[in-house]
Image (tube, grey):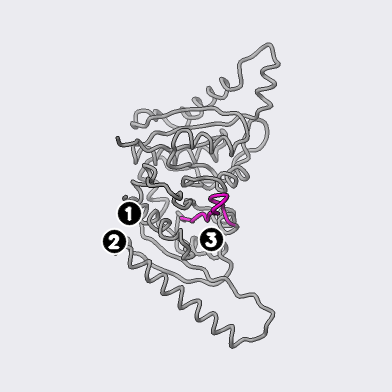
Amino acid sequence: MILRPSVLCPIDFSESSRGALRYARAIAAHFAARLTVVAVDDPLLGEAAALSTAGTPVSEDTAREIDRFVRQTFKDIRRDGIDLRCETATGKPAAEILRVSRERNCDLIVMSSHGLTGFRKMFFGSTTERVLRETSVPVLVTPGADHGPTEVEDVSAAVRRVLVPVDFSAATGWQLRFARGLSEALNRPLLLLHVIEPVRTMVAAQSRLLHVEAERRSRAEVGLDGLLQMLPPSLKPEALVAYGEPAEEIAKIANDRDAGLIVMGLHSSPVTGPRMGSVTYRVLCLAPRLVLAVPPVPAGSGALGAVSRAVVGT
């Protein structure tokens, strides 16, 4: 049995989440995937509605808002062959997004980096961060000011180049396979980057420090050369070594080299699972780019998600 790919897009009815929805629709159309759109209500609204003798349940109002939001965003999304599902949930936004992702066996979450605050709205800054800290599936984070693609072909035009910051950890191979698959699918060149952080020491041994820096650069170049050997020439792969604070350098190079998509690896803990590090968080703050956060392959999992299989070619 071939499982149909599944994409989840949380919305808060802001223009930022409308942009994320357009990306989700483009991805769902490309992979012939099921698209689930979910909005999360504050539990206090449900309690207030239950105490009221008039009006309709909050979930019914929200369901109508979702339908209106989707119809305002697309002329007729169902004609694209997309299996569209709309859902409402009540509770803490991040927890509910992750719950729906698990229960619907979603392969990808697409959400904006920022949204709205206030009544019936999700604060996407903190919500996105919490989702990234606990997700077991890749998350595509779209910039808050990005209106999203009108057509599927617009995604490739927006990406231009795929940037992959690597740290040579155990998760780098999986991260690179994902980036390679996306680069091939979008027909865009691939740029590998390793950032060497400055050595902070109180010891004034300049000659020793220079030796350490030279050794670190040599190891980085060897590591990048090994990764380049894994990539086909058709991707026009390149590799760079940079010095400085990782997030700042990643954002700078993404801008200088016109990279519209950054593929970041999410590190994990054997006890608590995937966690977003400070580097990924800073990149999201500094770089107005698409960021695909890729968690490690789940331990003991012999299977990949349908979208993941399609992207990495396994």
Q: Residue at x 39, y 43 (%)?
A: 305
- Left/right of residue 179 with respect to residue 102 in the rendered view: left
- Residue that appears at 49% across and 41% down: 20
Name the residue beneath numbered marker 2.
234
Asked if labels 3 and 1 touch by Cβ distance under 8 angstroms, the answer is no
Front disc: 1 or 3? 1
Disc on the earlier residue, 1 or 3: 1
Q: Secondary structure at mark 1?
A: helix
Label 2 neighbourhood size at 10 Å, few (<14), some (14-19), many (20+)? few
Return the residue at label 1: 184
- Tell me which label, 3 or 2, sits earlier in the chain: 2
Distance from Cα at disc 1 to Cα at disc 2: 8 Å
The answer to whether 38 appears left or right of 307 in the picture is right
Tell me the magenta residue range: 262-277
Q: From the top left corner, tell me how far across and down residue 126 is, in percent.
A: 63, 45
Give the residue drawn at x 38%, y 43%: 307
